[in-house]
Image: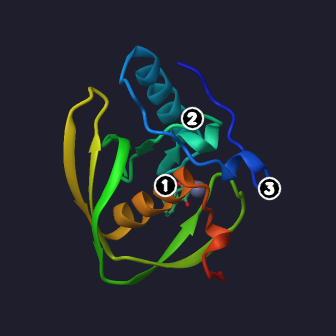
Amino acid sequence: MSILSILHYPDKRLRNVASSVTSINKKIQTLIDNMFETMYLQEGIGLAATQVDIHKRIIVIDTSKQKNEKIVLINPKFLNKYGSEIFEEGCLSIPNMRVYVSRSSTVKIEAFNYYGKKFFLKATGLLSSCIQHEMDHLIGKLLIDHSIRKL
Ligand code: K1U
Ligand code: ZN
């Protein structure tokens, strides 16, 4: 596996809008493996392909304490979002900044997994915040674009 370089703000490539994945093949699976390795090394709980300069709709997440609950989202789509909550967030592309962001408290999404199987997920709490943060990356949106309060 390989460690990938993470783009840092104000790199304009963070503003790219990612394209859908058309085929979930070995190349995509290797990218996902490398994204997990990079995310764990950086002590993140999520990483979007945009952040490693790959402009495809791919997200990896692991919000577990033991780092053993991998979630892969390929071509994720929101089905429903509701409620409102303030989350404390950081971003691996904007080091040393943590801010409060107002987001939906619950999200329901559909996506394809590592093996190309469609699945549905309902998330609250940290996982909900992380999914919304990573989905923002796929459309070129960053923490600093939200009306935020620095901690
Ligand atoms: O996408 C990224 O930049 C990764 C980012 C994701 C994220 C963090 C917090 C809330 C929502 C989304 C990080 O993982 S930054 C590291 C971090 O802030 C954190 C690490 C462990 C637990 C909680 C937060
Ligand atoms: Zn981020």
Q: Nearer the viewer, residue 5 or 140?
A: 140
Task: Identify which amino acid the numbered label 1 is placed on.
Answer: Glu
Q: Which mark is residue 10?
A: 3
The C terminus, quarter of image = bottom right
Q: Is mark 1 within 8 Å of ligand 1?
A: yes
Label of residue 23 in the image: none
Give the secondary structure at mark 1: helix
**Mark sitting earlier along the chain (2/1):** 2
Residue, disc 2: 38
Image point (40%, 58%), residue name:
131
Cα separation between marks 3 and 2: 20 Å
Question: Which residue in the structure is indicated by mark 1?
Answer: 134
Q: Earlier in the sequence, mark 3 or mark 2?
A: 3
Q: Residue at x 54, y 39 (%)?
A: 49
In this rendering, which labeled residue sits more in front, label 3 or label 2?
3
Q: Residue reaching furthest right?
A: 10
How many residues crowd around disc 1 within 10 Å: few (fewer than 14), some, or many (20 or more)? many
Residue under the point 22% across and 54% down: 121
Relative to 22, is 110 above or below? below
Q: Amino acid at mark 2?
A: Thr
How far across and how far down the image is residue 23, in percent? 37, 23
SS class, disc 2 = helix
Looking at the image, is mark 3 or mark 1 earlier in the sequence? 3
The amino acid marked with disc number 3 is Pro
- Point out the frontmost of discs 2 and 1: 1
Q: Are marks 3 and 1 in contact (CB under 8 Å)?
A: no
**Residue density around tag 2, few if under 14, some if 14–19, many if 20 or more, within 10 Å:** many
- Residue at disc 2, CB closer than 8 Å to ligand 1: no
Residue 42 located left or right of residue 79:
right
Relative placement, left or right, of 91 versus 111 is right
Q: Position of residue 101 (x, y in %)?
A: 53, 77
